[in-house]
Amino acid sequence: MDTFERNLETIQWELGIEPPNQAAVVYTTKRDGTFLRSLVPTLLLIGIFLYAMRRGPMGAGCGGRGGGLFGIGETIAKIIKDDIEVWFADVAGCEEAKLEIMEFVNFLKNP
């Protein structure tokens, strides 16, 4: 800016323009909103990221369980009552399932 003012003053002096008639240099600050417009894409990306974190599969809104990024180790297992009395004879029509379970139990008893 200093160089511009010196060059302007030199040219006006060489042209013979008297000081009261010389062009005055006035600096103003113009705010046209370019800064705010440059922030819009960034804010939009941050908003989409936050929305995805809350609503996505790893987000806090996952089935009402809390979940979240660090909720990987949480279980959804339910505790059931111990007084359930169900025997093999109570299950009808599942002979193959009964045999598989009996083989599994036998393996656990006699590995």
Image (cartoon, rainbow, N blue to C red):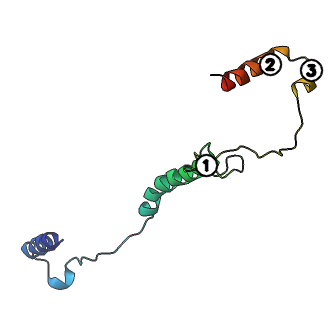
Please identify the residue farthest to the bottom as the structure is shown: 20
Please give the label number shown on residue 37: none
| 29 relative to 73, above or below | below
Given residues 92 and 6, the one toward you in this image is 92
Identity of the residue drawn at 73% across and 24% down: 105
Discs 2/1, front: 2
The residue wearing badge 2 is 97
Quick one: SS at disc 2? helix
Please identify the quarter of the rendering in which residue 3 is found: bottom left
The residue wearing badge 3 is 92
Q: How far apart in space, not on screen, are marks 1 and 3 (Cα)? A: 42 Å
Q: How far apart in space, not on screen, are marks 3 and 2 (Cα)? A: 10 Å
Q: Which of marks 3 and 2 is nearer the N terminus?
A: 3
The residue wearing badge 1 is 59
Identity of the residue drawn at 54% across and 50% down: 49
Q: Earlier in the sequence, mark 1 or mark 3?
A: 1
Quick one: SS at disc 3? loop
Q: How far apart in space, not on screen, are marks 2 and 1 (Cα)? A: 38 Å
Identity, as a three-letter code, of the amino acid under mark 1 = Gly
The N terminus sits in image quarter: bottom left
Residue 9 % position (x, y) = 12, 75
Discs 1/3, front: 3
Identity, as a three-letter code, of the amino acid under mark 3 = Ala
